[in-house]
Image (spheres, helix red, strand yellow):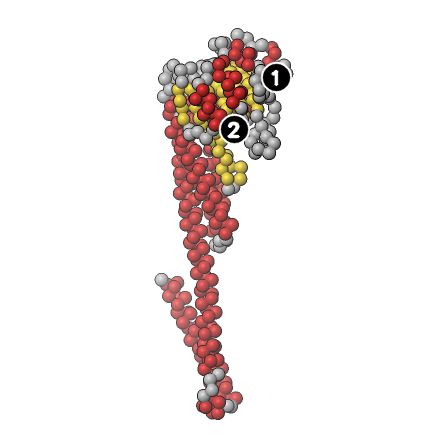
Amino acid sequence: MAVSPSVDAPAPALLPTGPVQLGPGPRGTGSGTGQPAPHAEAHVFRDGKVRHLPLDLNLVRGLLDDPQAFVWLDLVNPDPADLEALREPFDLHPLAIEDALVGGQRVKVEPYDTFWFVVLHGASLPSQDRLQLHEMALFIGQRFVLTIQHQPLFADEEIVARWQLVPAAWRSSASSLTYVILDTIVDNLRELTDQIERELREVRTTMTRSQSVHPELLQRIFSLEEVTHEAYTVALSLRDTLPTFVHAPEEAPVGGPAQAPYYRDVHDHAIGVVERLGAERDLSQRVFDVYQSLAAQQQSEVARQLTVVSTIFLPLTFLTGFFGQNFEYLTQKTASERAFWVWGFGSYLLSLLAIAWVIRRVSRRGRDG
C-alpha cells in the first residue's frame, strides 16, 4: 500500500472523536505542572524511507495492513482516552495500557499474543546533584511501535536519523526501530557515565591540589555518590533485560537470527556501562575516604597549632602566678633590677628554650617515624 500524498498536509487531531486530543507541536512543558505538555508524533517507515504522518487514526489503521511498512507513534503524557482509542486498532491489552499510563514500572518485557509490552528506563544528569529518570513504555508489534513517555529522553528526529543508518535489508521490520531506540538509550547512559567520571575526577583534583576541605565539597561528594548509585541501578536493569531481545524467537515481533548480532552489540555496550559505573561507585567511595583523611589532617593541624600556642603561654601563666604570690622572699628580697632580670625574665627565657627543644625533638621524631 502506497503512502497517501496527504502525509504532508496539515495534521488533524490524533483522536478527533475523543474527549481529549493530542496534537503535534513542540515538546513544551505543561503550565505549572513540571511535566512536558501532551504531545504526539506519527511516522511511517516504508521502502527504506521514513515520512511524517498526520495524526489520523484511520490513516494509521490502513497502514497496519501494508506488509512493506510499519508505523511509529510516539506519545508524551497521553490521557487514558488517547490510549483507549488505540486499543482496538493495535489490539492492545488493557493491563499493558494501565501500566503504560500509571508509570513507575520496573524494567520488563511481557509478550502478548500480538505484541510485546516493554518498559525501559533511561537516565540523564540535568544538574550535578540530581539524576533524572526517564521511563518509556513500548508496544512492539509486527507492523507498529508505540512509545509512551512521561519525561522524554530524546527527540524523534534523533531516532529517525539513527534509523537511517540501519542496513537496508532490515528496515522493513519494526524491530529495526526497536533496536535504534535501545541503542539510543544505552548511548545516553554512556554519555551519562562520562559526565559522572568527569565530575569525580574534578572533585578528586580539587582535593589533591588544595589539600583542604569544606562543607560544600562534602555535599558534592555525597550527591555524586548517590547519582552514581542510581545510574548503576538503571544500567543494571537494562543490561539484564537486553538478553530477551538477543534470544527472541523467530515468531517474535523483535529480534531473530539475522538481527541478533545488533541486539548483542547493544547488550555488550550495556555491560560496559555497568562495569564503568560499578568502578565509579567504588571511586566515589574512595573520594569520600580521601575527604575524611584530609578533614582529619586539617583538624589535626589546627589542634597542633593550638597546642603550640597553649604550650608557649603555659610557662608565662605559671611564672605570672608564681611571682604574683605574696611570699616574704619575693616581696622583700627580690626587689632589685638585677633580681628582676635574673629571676623574672631569665626563668621565662629558659622555659621558652626548653619548649623549643621539646617541639624540635617531637617534630624530628614524627618525620623519622
| Proximity of marks 2 and 1: CB atoms separated by less than 8 Å | no
Residue 53 location (% of width, % of height): 57, 16
- State whether residue 26 is above or below residue 307: above
Give the distance between the C-alpha atoms of the residues marked 2 and 1, in whole angstroms: 23 Å
Q: Quadrant of the C terminus?
A: bottom left
Q: Earlier in the sequence, mark 2 or mark 1?
A: 1
- Which amino acid type corresponds to the residue marked 1 in the rendered image? Ala
Residue 72 makes an appearance in the image: no
Q: Is residue 22 left or right of residue 348?
A: right
What secondary structure is marked by label 1? loop
Residue highlighted by disc 1: 11
Q: Give the residue displayed 37% in from the left and 15% down from the top.
A: 250
Q: Is residue 17 left or right of residue 303?
A: right
Residue 153 location (% of width, % of height): 52, 29
Q: Give the residue displayed 48% in from the left and 80% down from the top.
A: 320
Residue 6 makes an appearance in the image: yes
Residue highlighted by disc 2: 150
Residue ranking furthest to the right: 10
Residue 190 location (% of width, % of height): 46, 33
How many C-alpha atoms fall within 10 Å of the one at disc 1: few (<14), some, or many (≥20)? some
- Which amino acid type corresponds to the residue marked 2 in the rendered image? His
Residue 318 location (% of width, % of height): 45, 78
Q: Give the residue displayed 42% in from the left and 75% down from the top.
A: 354
In the figure, residue 359 lies in which quadrant? Answer: bottom left
Q: Nearer the viewer, residue 162 or 137?
A: 137
Q: Nearer the viewer, residue 120 or 348?
A: 120
Q: Give the residue displayed 56% in from the left and 29% down from the top.
A: 36
Residue ranking furthest to the top: 1
Residue 326's disc number: none
Residue ranking furthest to the front: 19
- State whether residue 269 is above or below residue 302: above
